[in-house]
Image (cartoon, rainbow, N blue to C red):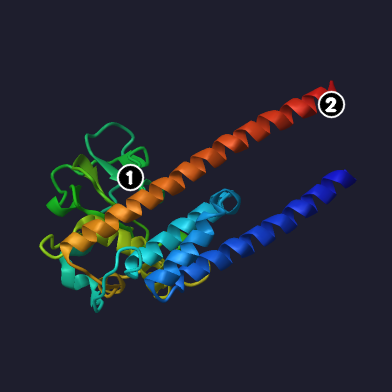
Amino acid sequence: MALCDRLEQQTSDQLEAHETLVDTLLGALTQSENATELADNWARLAAHFDTLFTTEQSIDKLKQTILQLATAGKLVPFQGAPVPLKNILSFGPRNGFSPKESNHETGCKVLKLGATTKGWLDLSESKNVDIGNSVLPHLWLKKGDILIQRGNAANHVGCNVLLDSDYPNYIYPDLMMKVRVKEEMAIPSFVALYLSAPGARQFMWERMTGTSGTMPKISKKVVEEIPVSLPDIETQKAVVQKVDELTALCDQLKQRLNQASETRCQLAEAVVEGALN
């Protein structure tokens, strides 16, 4: 047991030092003042990828840094004065509808909040509802819709998912908002990316309402006023492509991490079993 205690303390110290190092190097990236400095800081990070990004938390921080750099015009250079989100919307923000759950198949389902907390649409997080012919047309899920959580646990408030196709017979609930962008001004994937970045999330978190013990929420007005810097359409596409490439790298790192963790668990179980037998 004393050995276990020493190992636990050693692990805790190592994790704390590792987290500090990751935060410092990622901070240097976001504070880069020009392309040369950014390239130098990125090279320093890339040289130690295998030792820096060895936890899910560090990989998630890397993803957030990528989004922050992208929306600041540092991955693909762009400049532009920010405008309120409402200026580039063709629809919304508009709340959904949460009818009473049905205990049988009805041909219509409403999303639960868990459907959009993972960064992708999880249709298993839904429930049957009986709405008859009363549902409003805007509630149906269509390709290009962006769903934003307006109420949930604080860390989930403001998270969004972009729908990549139509989802017939599904509607979104009251604690989500839907927006659609003017596609002559913006591509939906760029706006969804922008809303996921630390700047937009912080803007929403700072304006949440709700006292201790209640579910925090953001209003329609808060979402309308989120500042968005909007380059031309071709630059938006280039930004999205670059972010997709780097996010895929993060997902590969996380997959390797999970595989290594599984191998370590199997090894530990084998060692313990051998010791006890």
At label 1, counting other C-alpha atoms closer than 10 Å, the crowd grade (few under 14, some 14-19, many 20 or more) is some
In the picture provided, is 40 more to the left or to the right than 133? right
Q: Is residue 89 left or right of residue 5?
A: left
Question: Which mark is on residue 275?
Answer: 2
Could you tell me the amino acid type at mark 2?
Ala
Q: Mark 2 Cα within 10 Å, few/some/many (few <14, many 20+)?
A: few
Q: Which of the image's four quarters has the C terminus? A: top right
Q: Is residue 171 above or below residue 67?
A: above
Expressed as whole percent of the image width and height from the top left, the position of residue 73 reads: 32, 69
Label 1 sits on a secondary structure element that is loop
Which quadrant of the view contains residue 84?
bottom left
Horizontal placement of 193 versus 5: left or right? left
From this viewpoint, which residue is outermost toward the right?
2
Separation of marks 1 and 2 at Cα, in angstroms = 45 Å
Nearest to the observer: residue 37 or residue 3:
37
Task: Look at label 1 and name its amino acid.
Answer: Leu
The residue located at (35%, 49%) in the rendering is 245
The residue at 49%/60% (across/down) is: 43
Helix, strand or loop status at disc 2: helix
Pointer 1 or 2: first along the chain: 1
Labels in figure, total = 2
Residue 10: image location, x then y, percent? 78, 53
Say which residue appears at 58% left-offset and 54% top-offset: 52
Q: Which image quadrant is residue 181 in?
A: bottom left
Q: Is residue 143 visible?
A: yes
The reply to whether callout 1 and callout 2 are in contact (CB within 8 Å) is no
- The residue beneath circle 1 is 121
Using the image as rendered, state which of residue 134 and residue 43 is in the foreground. Answer: 43
State the image quarter where residue 22 is shown: bottom right
Q: Is residue 100 positioned above or below 275 on the image?
A: below
Using the image as rendered, state which of residue 125 and residue 165 is in the foreground. 165
